[in-house]
Image (cartoon, rainbow, N blue to C red):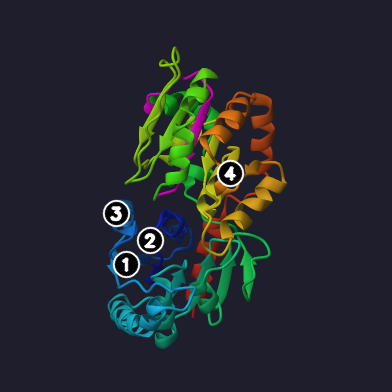
Amino acid sequence: MMRVLLAGGGTAGHTSPLLATADAIRRLAPDLDIEVEITCLGTPRGLENRVVPEAGYPLELIPPVPLPRTPGADLVKVPFRLRAAVKEALAVFDRVRPDVVVGYGGYVSVPAYLAARRRKVPLLVHEQNAVPGVANKLGARFAQRVAVSFPDTPLPKAEYVGLPIRTMISGLDRAALRTQAREFFGLDVDRPTLLVTGGSQGARKLNQSVSGAAAALAAAGVQVLHVVGPQGEATPEPADGAQSVPYVVVNFVDRMDLAYAAADLVVCRGGASSVTEAAAVGLPGIFVPLPIGNGEQEHNARPIVDAGGGLLVADADVTPDWVARTLPALATDAGRLAAMGAAASALVPRDADEKLARMVFEAARP
């Protein structure tokens, strides 16, 4: 029996590659004649509390340890929080007895990395972004292997494998599912379709800017599938005479494969999962990097944009006026969208989940 502990949580940016890896491990194990037991490690306040149990994996929880980038009161608290979280992580290790640990960064990973080092368990690190986070910079120092989603990610021992994505996305045939997908969301099967999503948490700026241009989109015959986030909202006001053009607002989508299949163009942030999934299925993207952090979202989107697979727009520039001036013409230009989609899909590995899974099997062998 091989026991695997996967540490990651918070948003879909961490949980999606974690679950894709878990599924790949479980899928490959019979061919290798290996029995596996997979446990996930998260924190009480992340998306993992819903999606991990729904995917059929046990979930252990430890306290989160945010790592502030600037000095302040929170930075002073880190050693105390970290000590408590590592103690909890060690208790999980002693219950689960993992043969290998895989960390995906974020608040849960540093305690897991330190516990793996303390218990002398082989550690793999996967960095989702082109610019690594603080947690993975630390973990990479003593990990056996380091996998990255983008070429030239500045981490020691980095091996470029890509970002693990779910098979429902990596194997998606958008054209074959288009009619079903549009009917699923209550959209017109024949209209050009814009997908708007700020990721698993939503994005207020995108919500306001696109819904504020609903009239211009409707006037051009462009329908919208708008995923506003769990706490988000959008109040589109279609133009007179264009009420028949759907503008569908949903808080969350579990079937992102159908959302991608329904769409001809997506407006999204530059998170690794958003960029990689859109490119993998050949969906042209308007990438609007989050204007905080260490600039990783712009770096994530840059290779796709440079190849002609999308556009990169600063958050401050995305206004209702900009949307009205730019998106109707692009969303109705089928030839340009096809060329952009082809350019994007040519860049992205679709087998990163299996590559990382094989690294896990190799690391767990004595």
**What SS does tag 4 mark?**
helix
Q: Residue at x 39, y 83 (%)?
A: 76
Count the marks: how many?
4
Q: Which residue is mark 4?
A: 317
Q: Residue furthest top?
A: 241
How many residues crowd around disc 1 within 10 Å: few (fewer than 14), some, or many (20 or more)?
many
Closer to the chain start, of discs 4 and 2, is 2
The answer to whether one can see residue 100 in this image is yes
Q: Nearer the viewer, mark 3 or mark 2?
A: 2
The answer to whether one can see residue 345 in this image is no
In 3D space, how far apart are the residues under numbered discs 4 and 1 (Cα atoms)? 35 Å
Q: Nearer the viewer, mark 4 or mark 3?
A: 4
Closer to the chain start, of discs 4 and 3, is 3
Q: Which residue is mark 3?
A: 50
Residue contact between numbered discs 2 and 1, judged by CB atoms under 8 Å: yes
In 3D space, how far apart are the residues under numbered discs 4 and 3 (Cα atoms)? 34 Å
Q: Amino acid at mark 4?
A: Asp
How many residues crowd around disc 4 within 10 Å: few (fewer than 14), some, or many (20 or more)?
few
**What SS does tag 2 mark?**
loop
Residue closest to the eye, 324 or 196: 324
